[in-house]
Amino acid sequence: MIGSILRRGRTARGFGRVGRAAADRWQRSLQLRVGATTTVLVGLLALVLGFTLLHQISRGLLDAKLRAAQQDASNGLELARAQLKVINDTDPDALAGTAQRVIIDLARRGSPAGLFDVGVVDLESPGTSWSAGSAELAASVPSDLARLVDSDNLAYAYGPILYPNGSQVAGLVLGGPIHTQHRTLGLYYLFPLTAERSTLALIQRIVLVAGLGLVLFVVLIAVLVTRQVVGPVRLAAGTARRLADGHLEERMQVSGKDDLSLLARSFNEMAGSLQQQITKLEEMSRLQRRFTSDVSHELRTPLTTVRMAADLLFSQREDFAPEVARSAELLHDELGRFEALLTDLLEISRYDAGVAVLEAEPVDVRLLVGRVADAVRTVAEQHGSELLFGLPAEPAIAEVDPRRVERVLRNLLVNAIEHGEGRPVHLTLSRTESTVAVTVRDHGVGLRPGEAGLVFNRFWRADPSRTRRTGGTGLGLAISLEDARLHGGWLHAWGRPGGGAQFRLTLPIGLGGRPLAIEPAAVEEPTPVEEPVPAAGLTAQ
């Protein structure tokens, strides 16, 4: 029983794989779809035409047979009436002898309708009949036809003609009345339709072979024509894939002057234009990266000198006049922002140049969260936001670069505080056997649809006016994303207008999934996942 169920299950899975493979092949192959569609349509057309043709031929054969048979029956009735009308029908022997001679005479006559059997039946005594031929007259005459003849009608009917050996063939039976002095007789012609059926069978075979030949011929033409069209399209698709892979020198072969050749020339022109534009963009990007790197490095030395002078003025601002002291303070603050921007530009230039180095070591990520919390607590107090943490009780050890992870967490927390509208900011840490994840959740302005994929772009701002109020370089999240990628992890964003935003940093310990979802379980304030860790400066929710 169990073995039978398992075999049925394997069979079902096998059919499922075959069905999926066929569906995939159908979706991928234009030539297959055109060939199959052509086969079905031409097959249906051939079927309809063949059925109509056979129907018309069958009707034509039967109509011709019927007309010839009716003419034979009419002539036979005239002859039989002339001979049987004058006999003494009260004498059975005389009636039988005359009837026998009549049917023999009729049987010897040729007929345009083909071979036939003929017989006479005494309608007043149906058991009495005379026939010429091998067919059983009484059994072959349908009862409905006998009633019509008895009603003085020349009638016909299609039905089986029976023979003494038990065989039967399809046939046409015609009958008409003969009135003698005291009796009414019925004259019947039995025409086998064997020849007509043989002719129809031959025509059916011819139509079937012709229809199959037509279908195969049309399908062959469709496949050849489709191949002529699909071939260049596949070549163009292959060339486009190679272009997308970076082989910008790839071109299509052009031969002829038809539409496909025009497509190939246009494709090559497009590829050449793209190659030129990409080359220009790569050169511009290279120059931009070099300019950013050179300017950033060149500004370090004068900025250090200016910083020393500014620090000196800032430390002695109490001895200056109020307006001069205020200028020293502004100079000190703006130099701090300038240094932050310069540091970010230098970091971005390292990533662009591919020289960023990961100095990883085993670290308890909870300790990094504690250090970041102490660093941003003043910013949170200035904005009126409470920092709430949900951390596991067990250590969350991961091979990470502490400086880069701290920078990511600091950027996420500061970003959440500045956009949190003074509401609480939640940081949740969780881990699995293969990954560590941190989510930072605020309940502020949130993100509009589509902005979750833009927040990591360089210098991108959802609200330009907020830039002037909160400052910032617009590079923090872009650098954070690069730091996460350098660890082999990822940084995701989620948000909704008025419902706040959530960012998730995923750092792999090994291969595996992510222990926290990017979208929070509820828009309201989330609950910490475990007991808070007793780290310095952390407030448990």
Image (tube, rainbow, N blue to C red):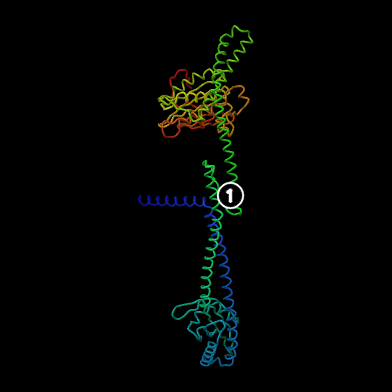
The residue nearer to you, when weighing 138 against 251, is 251
Crowd class of label 1 (few under 14; some 14 to 19; many from 20; radius 10 Å): many
Asked if residue 499 lies left or right of residue 433, the reply is: right
Q: Amino acid at mark 1?
A: Ala
Nearest the eye: 134 or 232? 232
Nearer to us in this view, 136 or 276: 276
SS class of the residue under badge 1? helix
In the rendered image of this protein, does residue 24 appear above or below residue 158?
above
In this rendering, the answer to whether 66 lies above or below 272 is below
Image quadrant of residue 327? top right
Whole-percent x, y for residue 282 in the image: 56, 35
Residue 292 image position (x, y, % from top left): 56, 27
* Percent position of residue 114, x then y: 54, 82
Position of residue 425 relative to residue 48, above or below, is above
The residue beneath circle 1 is: 264
Q: Is residue 380 visible?
A: no
Asked whether residue 540 appears in the rendered view, the answer is yes
- The number of callouts visible is 1
Q: Which quadrant of the structure image shows residue 465?
A: top right
Q: State which quadrant residue 63 falls in.
A: bottom right
Q: Position of residue 120 (x, y in %)?
A: 53, 85
In the picture as drawn, the residue positioned furthest to the top comes out as: 319
Q: Which residue is at the front of the view, 189 or 151?
A: 189
Instruction: Name the residue located 51 percent from the left edge and 21 percent from the top edge.
Output: 387
- Residue 173 in the image: above or below residue 18: below
